[in-house]
């Protein structure tokens, strides 16, 4: 099936996805009722934009492709910052529909690009560094204005930052409340090497707790030359009964191993590949040895080791930037204690500053803690909805480290008032003005979700004063900085980038050629 020139159905599917997701935006955003994936046939209530998108389906194959393009835009933001997926689709829809595909030429696109660059520059200028009060506010807003969850998530985040640990959370059907626990844990400043490793599609992470099998850790040297043999070795030795965390001294540039990762996944195994942190080969090798000590295994050296002695942990979670090991295995205390004591002894010696920093890094790595948020509730549906809000709040505070701005919608409205360039070329001007109008869409959608369709009267204060905007919780215009209605600069910047990229792609599509006419269900790969 090939169509040339008519993309109306593609836009119809794209707009369907955006319309479904954008109703969840803001404090007064509406809930979506979905069928639970964990308990089929049971309801799941959520405000999570990606969760809504994942449940959309289309019998028309062209409309389906539009759904998929919308989903991909949101997922890119999810992977990059873990939040602002709904904002991405609100912006993407406004941009993609701001001009017709027939009018979209290179000069219009240049106008788009110019307005986009100016908007990003203004976000950088306006962003402010976060303090403790800000972190709590961001967590509360992201948790749908639940002050209890906001307080717990911000406390967990600040405690983890203080002790050099990390924050994790879990569904606990035996509890009726949300509370904190402190456990041992190890955090690497390296994430999974490819999205091919993702097994939690909603959150774009690898999470070993989603599979009912033990999790093993294999520090490995020599992967690059033997990647095919290694994966085959895992298959031949029935390692697929495990979640496999393969930590390499160097991954290399070739993508061939990604197919092997997918092969393992298709065989019901779970494999996540991670590159060891640090710069030099010696540092990376030492970190691999420390991980082996922590997990109770041995470093496998290709051509030297005669068997794999893997370590084992209770849980591993890996995203694009970090990998977290939870709950150190019992029985390794003596070996771990001896390693830390050796580090302390070395720190007392006369060593270079760089050597000292590396030793301190190793000590912090081996002495880490995990701040665990226990998510309880009366029913599965209630816990699921609270779990999503905890997840949103945690992702929001993690993304705000790079700075915050008051209410994303009002900040974009303020920036809109600053985009006043004039161009001699009418097409460049058309693109510039179209993008300028599109960034008002989050503000307008927040008003619409609050049943305030006369958003024009609320816009003027945001145009005139940075920080003034519509507060949906109060149903009035107020100082959003004083009200602590804040957004992550990083999240808004990512949403803007991915929305623009998707919109430009949509407007440039002219040929649609599909092989299959079968119904497909939207799924995040």
Image: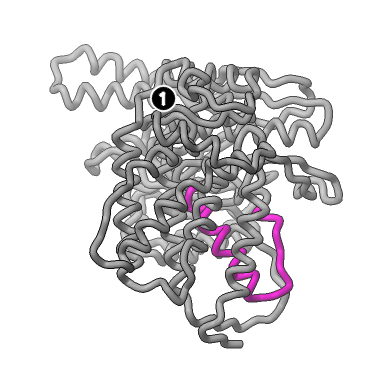
Which residue in the protein does label 1 denote?
366
Image quadrant occupied by the N terminus: bottom right
Residue 152 lies left or right of residue 5; in this view the side is: right
* Residue 443 screen position, x and y as percent: 53, 41
When asked about the image quadrant of residue 14, the answer is bottom right
- Which quadrant holds residue 492? top left
Q: Position of residue 289 (x, y in %)?
A: 36, 35
Which residue is located at x 35 percent, y 26 percent? Answer: 128
Classify residue 229 as left or right of residue 328.
left
Q: Quadrant of the C terminus?
A: bottom right
Q: Residue 454, percent across and down?
A: 61, 41
Nearer to us in this view, 149 or 244: 149
Residue that appears at 71% across and 55% down? 55
Q: Please say whether residue 367 is one of the residues in the magenta stretch.
A: no
Looking at the image, which residue sits at the far top? 348
Q: Which residue is found at the position 41% from the left and 66% from the top? A: 256
Q: Mark 1 Cα within 10 Å, few/some/many (few <14, many 20+)?
A: many
Residue 490 pos. (x, y %): 40, 39
Q: Is residue 187 visible?
A: yes
Quadrant for residue 488, please give it: top left
Outermost residue toward the right in this view: 41
- Name the residue nearer the viewer: 85 or 37: 85
**Region rendered in magenta:** 53-77
Report the residue at 44% width, 67% height from top.
505
Q: Is residue 316 above or below residue 151?
A: below
Which one is nearer the viewer's eye here, 69 or 207?
69
Query: What is the chief secondary structure element of the magenta stretch?
Result: helix
Q: Nearer the viewer, residue 17 or 516?
A: 17
Q: Is residue 63 magenta?
A: yes
Q: Secondary structure at mark 1?
A: helix
Q: Does the rendering let one see residue 285?
A: no
């Amino acid at each position: 099936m090939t169509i040339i020139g008519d993309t109306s159905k593609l836009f119809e599917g794209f707009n369907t996805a955006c319309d479904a997701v954008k109703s969840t935006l803001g404090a007064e955003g509406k809930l979506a009722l979905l069928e639970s994936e964990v308990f089929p046939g049971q309801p799941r209530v959520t405000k999570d934009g990606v969760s809504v998108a994942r449940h959309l389906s289309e019998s028309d194959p062209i409309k389906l492709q539009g759904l998929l393009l919308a989903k991909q835009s949101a997922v890119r933001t999810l992977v990059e910052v873990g939040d602002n997926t709904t904002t991405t689709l609100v912006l993407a829809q406004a941009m993609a529909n701001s001009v017709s595909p027939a009018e979209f030429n290179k000069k219009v696109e240049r106008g788009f690009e110019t307005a986009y660059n100016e908007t990003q520059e203004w976000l950088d200028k306006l962003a402010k560094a976060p303090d403790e009060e800000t972190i709590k506010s961001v967590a509360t807003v992201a948790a749908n204005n639940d002050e209890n969850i906001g307080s717990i998530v911000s406390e967990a985040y600040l405690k983890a930052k203080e002790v050099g640990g990390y924050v994790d959370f879990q569904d606990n059907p035996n509890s009726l409340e949300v509370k904190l626990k402190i456990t041992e844990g190890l955090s690497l400043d390296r994430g999974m090497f490819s999205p091919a490793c993702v097994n939690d599609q909603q959150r774009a992470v690898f999470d070993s707790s989603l599979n009912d099998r033990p999790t093993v850790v294999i520090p490995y040297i020599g992967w690059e030359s033997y990647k095919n043999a290694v994966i085959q070795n895992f298959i031949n030795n029935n390692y697929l009964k495990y979640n496999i965390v393969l930590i390499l001294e160097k991954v290399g540039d070739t993508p061939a191993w990604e197919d092997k990762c997918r092969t393992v996944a298709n065989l019901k195994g779970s494999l996540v590949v991670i590159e060891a942190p640090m710069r030099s080969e010696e540092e990376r090798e030492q970190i691999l040895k420390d991980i082996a000590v922590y997990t109770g295994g041995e470093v496998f050296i290709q051509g030297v080791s005669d068997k794999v002695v893997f370590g084992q942990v209770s849980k591993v979670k890996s995203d694009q930037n970090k990998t977290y090991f939870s709950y150190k295995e019992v029985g390794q205390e003596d070996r771990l204690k001896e390693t830390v004591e050796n580090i302390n002894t070395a720190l007392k010696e006369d060593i270079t500053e760089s050597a000292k920093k590396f030793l301190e890094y190793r000590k912090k790595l081996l002495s880490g803690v995990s701040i665990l948020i226990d998510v309880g509730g009366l029913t599965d549906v209630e816990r699921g909805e609270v779990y999503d809000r905890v997840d949103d709040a945690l992702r929001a505070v993690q993304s705000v480290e790079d700075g915050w701005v008051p209410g994303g919608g009002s900040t974009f409205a303020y920036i809109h008032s600053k985009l006043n360039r004039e161009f001699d070329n009418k097409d460049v001007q058309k693109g510039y003005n179209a993008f300028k109008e599109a960034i008002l869409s989050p503000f307008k959608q927040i008003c619409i979700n609050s049943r305030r369709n006369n958003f024009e009267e609320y816009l003027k204060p945001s145009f005139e004063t940075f920080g003034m905007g519509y507060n949906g919780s109060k149903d009035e215009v107020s100082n959003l900085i004083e009200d602590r209605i804040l957004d992550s600069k990083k999240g808004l910047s990512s949403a803007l980038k991915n929305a623009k990229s998707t919109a430009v792609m949509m407007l440039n599509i002219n040929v649609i050629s599909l092989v299959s006419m079968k119904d497909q269900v939207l799924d995040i790969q």
